[in-house]
Image (spheres, rainbow, N blue to C red):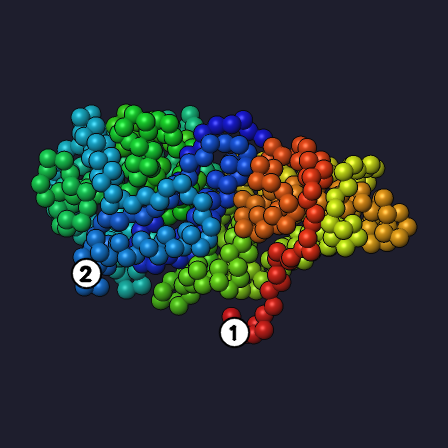
């Protein structure tokens, strides 16, 4: 396990022009799993998520609902907070870019960039996508079915002409290439790094960083009528959360990792580091661009009618079941797909039938055959030692994989240890030992009790509520629910206490689909 250290992790803040979708949920869940893992490893963690509330899209969405932008975002943000609460997202701060502290942060960053000679007044003429809040060069556009020009994301673009302040992005082309070369882990996974290398090597143009055609944004200092380009505003939230420009911000900054969707990698790995270089602020250590979550292999779209709200999914399958499926079946950094059948099959097989059944039959036998009392001493043989070695390997494998952001492989490694426990209990047959060798039965069940503790703690970043419910039944104190407890004396202390296991309650209900054709 890693030594104690500070660990600052963020999601990309969500744009609340509509209700949360599965992409928002997946990013928050994956980031939450990483944050929870680092807490278990003993690290000092600061985890931030939030909402990006300015820009033309918000102004237009508010207008379409006959309200003002502030009232609109105040209402929409509650849906994102509700999603975080329902999905058990353990963020330390939920930031809003309409906070006064954020205005102060971004305006100070602007002043420092300006003082460095990197901001100048000019005139913007070019293609702009309102939906992406992004500028595109003519060479980047693609033809639509009717011959119209579209952004690389397939969104409509419009020709925009207005007075604008510009950022000297072209000045930072070589510094960015040097950054990518000297810090190969700065952009992960490697596919995203290669994409950005190609983009920057193709040449960078100066970037328009203010707008005058609308006023829903952070005012440019000393420039009446100008508001900041929404991405300069939004990206700076990571500094606001750390406390910038107050000197205390260095407690958390630089961020250890920004977890973002692959569609916003350019903003985070080209514009963001260039802004920070200009302002003389240390760069984040890593940007990780995850893939898309697809509905039965298709990208979610209102026009296709396949947009599913995450809270409805959590209600249907259970919060931890949804979390487990997304982490187990969507390789972090790649696109992944979900369907009703896939979620039910995975969670029934892994959680209900494998880990849940292991815990239930072990605890039930301790309750029935040992009056709920744990044996204080365990005279373990080679089979017991082999099992504990397999469990240790599975838990260490999960930790190592989570450390390197390979979340699905970490869960798979953990699951092999669960399988080893089920093979062990089938081979040892403690239900038969009750009659033939009751002392050996106690050792087997005590060994399994310790293994289940380690497995529950290890998987708790993924299924926190279920793991806590299981450990509560087992009487494990809060202080003994981290990686430091593995191999410790928690079992000896618990067995020597007056703890008595009650009749266990199932933690992982099996999903029964009464109407399979309805999904």
**Distance between the Cα atoms at labels 1 and 2?**
38 Å
* Outermost residue to the front: 498
Q: Position of residue 188 (x, y in %)?
A: 45, 38
Q: Position of residue 473 (x, y in %)?
A: 63, 50
Nearer to us in this view, 392 or 91: 91
Q: Is residue 439 left or right of residue 222?
A: right
What is the number of the mark on residue 77?
Answer: none
What is the number of the mark on residue 67?
Answer: 2
Above or below, 15 against 383 in this view is below
Task: Tell me the crowding category of disc 2: few under 14, some 14 to 19, or many 20 or more residues within 10 angstroms, Cα based.
Answer: some
Tell me what residue is drawn at x 30 percent, y 39 percent: 237
Quadrant of res 387: top right
What is the number of the mark on residue 518?
Answer: 1
Nearer to us in this view, 25 or 71: 71
Above or below, 501 against 221 in this view is below
Residue 76 shows in this picture: yes
Residue 417 shows in this picture: no
Q: Is residue 74 left or right of residue 2?
A: left
* Outermost residue to the right: 436
């Amino acid at each position: 396990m890693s030594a104690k250290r500070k660990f600052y992790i963020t999601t990309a803040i969500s744009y609340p022009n509509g209700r949360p979708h599965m992409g928002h949920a997946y990013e928050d869940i994956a980031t939450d799993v990483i944050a929870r893992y680092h807490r278990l490893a003993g690290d000092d963690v600061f985890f931030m998520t939030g909402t990006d509330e300015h820009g033309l899209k918000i102004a237009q969405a508010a207008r379409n609902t006959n309200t003002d932008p502030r009232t609109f975002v105040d209402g929409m943000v509650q849906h994102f907070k509700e999603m975080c609460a329902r999905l058990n997202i353990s963020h330390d701060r939920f930031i809003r870019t309409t906070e006064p502290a954020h205005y102060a942060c971004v305006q100070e960053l602007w002043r420092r960039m300006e003082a460095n000679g990197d901001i100048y007044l000019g005139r913007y003429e070019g293609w702009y996508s309102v939906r992406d809040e992004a500028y595109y060069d003519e060479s980047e556009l693609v033809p639509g079915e009717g011959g119209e020009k579209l952004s690389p994301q397939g969104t409509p673009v419009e020709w925009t002409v207005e007075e604008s302040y510009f950022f000297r992005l072209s000045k930072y082309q070589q510094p960015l290439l040097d950054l990518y070369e000297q810090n190969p882990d700065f952009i992960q996974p490697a596919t995203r790094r290669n994409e950005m290398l190609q983009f920057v090597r193709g040449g960078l143009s100066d970037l328009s960083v203010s707008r005058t055609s609308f006023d829903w944004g952070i005012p440019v200092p000393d420039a009446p009528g100008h508001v900041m380009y929404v991405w300069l505003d939004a990206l700076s939230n990571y500094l606001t959360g750390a406390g910038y420009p107050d000197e205390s911000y260095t407690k958390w900054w630089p961020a250890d990792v920004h977890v973002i969707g692959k569609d916003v990698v350019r903003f985070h790995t080209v514009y963001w580091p260039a802004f920070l270089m200009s302002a003389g602020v240390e760069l984040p250590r890593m940007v990780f661009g995850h893939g898309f979550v697809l509905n039965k292999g298709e990208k979610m779209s209102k026009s296709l009618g396949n947009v599913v709200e995450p809270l409805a999914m959590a209600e249907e399958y259970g919060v931890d079941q949804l979390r487990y499926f997304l982490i187990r079946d969507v390789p972090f950094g790649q696109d992944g797909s979900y369907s009703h059948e896939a979620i039910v099959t995975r969670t029934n097989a892994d959680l209900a039938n494998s880990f849940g059944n292991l815990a239930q039959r072990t605890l039930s036998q301790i309750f029935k055959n040992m009056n709920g009392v744990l044996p204080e001493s365990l005279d373990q043989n080679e089979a017991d030692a082999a099992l504990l070695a397999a469990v240790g390997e599975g838990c260490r494998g999960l930790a190592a994989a989570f450390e390197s952001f390979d979340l699905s492989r970490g869960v798979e490694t953990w699951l092999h240890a669960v399988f080893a426990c089920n093979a062990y209990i089938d081979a040892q047959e403690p239900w038969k030992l009750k009659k033939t060798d009751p002392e050996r039965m106690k050792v087997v069940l005590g060994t399994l009790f310790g293994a289940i503790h380690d497995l529950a703690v290890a998987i708790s970043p993924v299924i926190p509520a279920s793991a806590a419910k299981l450990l509560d039944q087992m009487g494990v104190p809060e202080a003994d629910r981290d990686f430091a407890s593995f191999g410790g004396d928690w079992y000896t202390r618990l067995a020597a206490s007056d703890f008595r296991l009650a009749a266990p309650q199932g933690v992982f209900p099996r999903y029964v689909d009464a109407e399979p054709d309805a999904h």
